[in-house]
Image (tube, grey):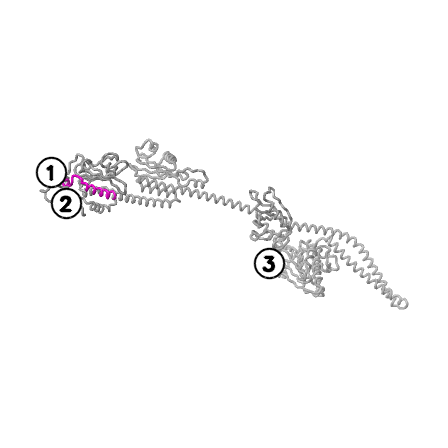
Amino acid sequence: MRTAEHDSGIFASRSGTGKEAGETAGEEGKGAASALAPLSAPILVTTILDEFSAISDYRVLQDSLPRRLASLLRSRYVLLYKRIGETLQFVSGTFDDRPGWSTSLLAVAQINPIDLNSERPEARAWRLRCVATAPADKSEPQLVAVPLIYRQRATGVLVAIRGGHEGQPAAGGQSAGSPGGTIGSRLPAYWSEEEIHVLEAVAGVSAMLLENTLLLERDRERIQELSLLNSIGSQINSAVHDLERLCTIIMQRSREIAPLDLCDVLLSPPMGRQAPWISPALSEALFRYAREQGSHPTPLLIERPGSPRTADYLCHLPGSLNTFIALPLISGGDPGRRGRLCGSEEREPRVLGLLVGGTYRPWKVRHVELMMLQVLASQASAALENIHLMTEVIEARNEARKLLRQVLDDQRLKELILESIPSGLMTIDLSGQITTFNRAASLILGYHPYEALGQPVHKILPLKNPQVLREVLQSGPGHRSPATYHETLISHDRQGQDLVLDMTWQPLCNDRGRQIGTLLTFSDVTSMHRLQEEKRRLDELASLGKMAASVAHEVRNPLASIKITMQMLMDDLEKLVQREAAEGSEGGDRGGQAQPRLEEHRGAQESIAVVLKEVERLDNIVRELLLFAKPRQLHRVPCDLIALNEHVLQTLQPCLNEAGIVVHRVYQRDLLEQPQRRLAVILADMEQMEQVLFNLYTNAIQAMPEGGILTVSAQIVLPPRSGTGASYILPRVRVAEGESSYLTSEEQQWLELSISDTGIGIPPEQLDLIFQPFFTTKAHGIGLGLAITQRLIESHQGHISVESRLGYGATFTIRLPLAPADNGAEIENEGESRTTESTSGGPQTS
């Protein structure tokens, strides 16, 4: 380097000959000063920067800088003082370019701290922020103290000394033979004013180097600490789901930060974790200490022999431990949020645990170590609090699921109760839309809930009086006892079948009494209504029957007398006609007179025949009245209705041919096969069933005076399902031998026989009247034929119905329950003979 080479050249020229060095011993210092080249600030600054800019270790720079400055500044002593607190303390120095500390150096340097308010040159330079010299009263000072200022901040003091100081001999006073004397003979004895200015520049560069190196070293330490803390945080965050692994990570990282021989984590309940070398009494004392610290705890550091404050802890520690430290783990964050989550009122910070450690050897805790342990404790506290929060969240989630399940169960129970109510239930909002539609309502009205919900109520249920709904909707608000309306509605379901509903309307209010809609409950009373109608009809029939019976009895006796008398008169006239005819054949006057009388008698016979015919018709009417009033007791036997029907059609075949009527038969295939004929067996009074068929076929023939088509169909069906009018045709059924012959209503099968004509049909207004007694549209008859037919079928637990379209004919359908299978076998032996016997007398029609 330039300065070093230049100085070496100077030293070489000064020591070229020993002769020149010893000629002027009295003026040695002055001669040396004048012979040396002056100090150059730019050269010195450049040299210092070149040599020391690459040093990144603050202690190395601090120890090596004084020695090199002593060489460059031609100074015997270079001392560095650093401010620590309110004092200046000696940190490094050099004497005569010798490494290490020497007695001479220690004699010059102030080992004891220098008070900043003292009058020493170092303190004055610090306070005044300018150069201080000693001796202060001389123009040629040997000691110069320059403050180390960087960016207007003083960090220390640089002291450079030439010659002797405070009683020490000057450089020229030392023996020439000693190394010190040799060097001292070459150095100036005092500082010139120009050199002091150079020294200020060197002090500024030194302050800059020292401060930058210190900051760089601190930055490296911070980076290292942050890297360590970052890795600690990542590792801790990855272990929040495993408490034991988290504690292991905390202990391992604590040993990396500080030289701990023992380390463990104590946890408070409910996690409750203890260390084997921590007694329960010490654990309780440590937790009590942590709770007393509040939200800003300080670590507990105990060093033997301890103090009165730590005596209670030392007595519980193992005797081999010299140093013990405990850092409280306190819950952080917002206690109020945690309190709201847990449902408690606690707002104070909670002690989650303690991080404890100890060493067997004396250990002075460094500030950096303590700070990093506190950061580790803070991260461990956050992780433990997260574990607490996750546990609380899981418990709260489980509780919420439990409550939700309970709510769903309660809701499901209410839905089941609503669906199990046998009465139809609907709720209607204030705009008239359906909001609830239970199962009973669906079964009664035939609508699926999805079809009814959201629809106006009048589209699902035609109201007889829509004003009722408006009145109910307007009566709820402000009424403690809202009005309730009852009405009976005759309507129809989705399939068009008639319904009679008993309905109740009432306002639907919320908990505050404000009306939110209307509650409608209704029951299907169609069956009851039909029973009432049937009872009324039966009562009327009973009254008519009594009247008809009395009339029949009263009329039948005179008719019998008239019939007998007229029959006797007919017999007498017949004898008289025969006698007169015999007399007329003899001739003469008597024969001529007999001829007119014979004609008169024959005219009387014709009149008597008319009377007898009318009497016979009256007798038939009386028999019908008696049959209607007092049906005779049934004599049921297994009856093949198909065979009986064929017998009646065969009997009426001449009438059918005469009227030009063609018969079409539409039978279920199984009913035509002999092995399955027993499926069409019914238990019936064969005479009455024959009467029923004669009446129906006679009506069909009379409805087609100009001919037509008579269609007869037969099939086995199930009873119609609820809410539908359709029948379901059954497949062929075989009943195994030995099975029970008793059938439930769901198992009961029916034989359906339909008789359709292509006549003029029945007007719609007369469809409900044709089965009423004494209703007739014919010129003759009293209208008891269909009434008797219905009564006979109902006495067999059957049913008869009629469908007609005016101008297209009518269809009469009778449905009779089939006999159990074991009874059907009798038809092969007994049924055919009984059919022949019952039909030998001929039909009777109305």
Q: Hey, which residue is sitting farthest top in the picture?
A: 308
Q: Give the image location of residue 836, x and y in percent.
A: 70, 60
- Residue picked out by circle 3: 731
- Residue picked out by circle 2: 10
Quadrant in which the C terminus appears? bottom right
Helix, strand or loop at mark 2? helix
Which of marks 3 and 2 precedes in the sequence? 2
The residues tagged by marks 2 and 3 sit, at their Cα atoms, a distance apart of 136 Å
Q: Is residue 789 left or right of residue 148?
A: right
Q: What residue do we see at 31% from left, 36% from top? A: 323
State the residue in front, 581 or 545: 545
Residue type pointed to by label 3: Pro
10 Å crowding of disc 3: few (<14), some (14-19), many (20+): few
Q: Give the image location of residue 437, x and y in percent.
A: 57, 50
The residues tagged by marks 1 and 2 sit, at their Cα atoms, a distance apart of 21 Å
State the residue in front, 411 or 664: 411
User: Which disc is residue 26 wearing?
Assistant: 1
Q: Main secondary structure of the magenta part?
A: helix
Residue type pointed to by label 2: Ile
Badge nearest the viewer, 2 or 3: 2
Q: Is residue 154 left or right of residue 75?
A: right
Part of the protein shown in magenta:
183-208
The residues tagged by marks 1 and 3 sit, at their Cα atoms, a distance apart of 151 Å
Q: Give the image location of residue 146, x and y in percent.
A: 23, 40
Helix, strand or loop at mark 3? loop
Residue 438 shown in magenta = no
Residue type pointed to by label 1: Gly
